[in-house]
Amino acid sequence: MSHIKHCFDRAILDLEVNKIRVLVPLKKQVLLTPKFRSILSSVKELGIIEPLAVHPSQGQPDYFDLLDGRLRLEALKSLGQSTVRCMVALDDESFTYNKQINRIASVQEYRMIRAALAKGASEERIAKVLAIDVKKVREKAHLLDGIAPEAARLLRDRQVSPEVFRVLRKMKPIRQIEAAEMMIAANKFAKSYADMILVTTRPEGLLEKAKSQVGKNISPEDITRMEAEMERLQHDSLAVEDTIGDTMLSLVVAKGFINRLLRNENIRLHLQRHHPDLLSSVSATLDAIAADGRGISQE
């Protein structure tokens, strides 16, 4: 039997917060977002549930480079914590690990909240931990009411806005499944795209109460035009699928190489001193690649 190499050390270590290096600093605006406030509240109430992912720094004994968990680390610093539980990577390819860590999707969040409620947690307690209104907790707890199980399964790992599910509820189950497949094919999960699917849905695909609400001010010509646009988008998405594998592989290799360069302290200091704009641009590009929705992580 072939030997399988582990990506991380099996031991979870308690590391000093001030010895974990963040290669790409967070922008100050991020600390003002609802997402960070939610993470800060969760860490304050429950501590770190998912360990950070780190890798030993090259040339700096006892220091580690952060691979995943920048917001959690920032929350710990804000709370004055001195240590944090970490998984130590045996390889330094941060992009690969980031792609393997599941960023929480709407359906996953729904299941977590339902599980917490089933275990006796109150809506108020959940709202406090997530730093959101109780009304939002109730909305998230009923996210899949009226949604076909197959449609929910298709969208379970996607970053789908709650408004999309409100649109899907106006359709019959078979049309919900078709809509989910169309959104995945086009890689579009916004409410505007769901609205377009709704408008182009024939009456037999809608629930009775939705038939009188859909298409009131839309002419047959508009519907025909939108159907043609959706067909074009689906054709374009299929064309992209033929090349997406090679493109993503190139991004993985390029990002890994650039990350290794930036981990070299001499190179980083040189760029900071002589080419700060270039360093900022490269860092922003790395952030954009890491935030690709195809693998979308819970910080």
Image (cartoon, rainbow, N blue to C red):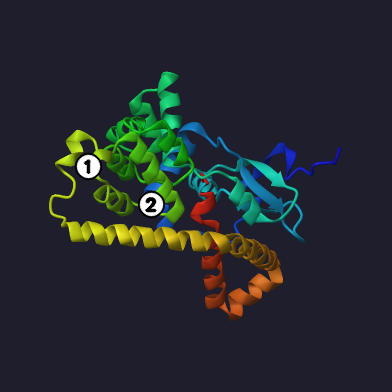
Q: Earlier in the sequence, mark 2 or mark 1?
A: 2
SS class, disc 1 = helix
Residue extending furthest toward the right:
1
Q: Please state the horizontal and vertical placement of residue 179, each as a whole percent of the image.
A: 37, 45
SS class, disc 2 = loop
Q: Please state the horizontal and vertical placement of residue 164, each as a whole percent of the image.
A: 32, 45
**Residue kind at label 2, given as amino acid type:** Thr
- Residue under label 2, please give it: 33
Quarter of the image where the N terminus is located: top right
Checking the image for residue 69, the label placed there is none
Crowd tier of the residue under label 2, counting other residues whose Cα lies within 10 Å: few below 14, some 14–19, many 20 or above: few
For the image, the number of numbered tags is 2
Q: Please state the horizontal and vertical placement of residue 64, each as a whole percent of the image.
A: 69, 52
Q: CB of mark 2 within 8 Å of CB of mark 1?
A: no
- Residue under label 1, please give it: 203
Q: Is residue 85 left or right of residue 32?
A: right
Q: Nearer the viewer, residue 54 or 149?
A: 149
Q: Please state the horizontal and vertical placement of residue 44, each as a whole percent of the image.
A: 47, 37
Against 262, residue 173 (above or below) is above
Q: Residue at x 44, y 30 (%)?
A: 111
Against 255, residue 206 (above or below) is above
**Residue kind at label 1, given as amino acid type:** Pro
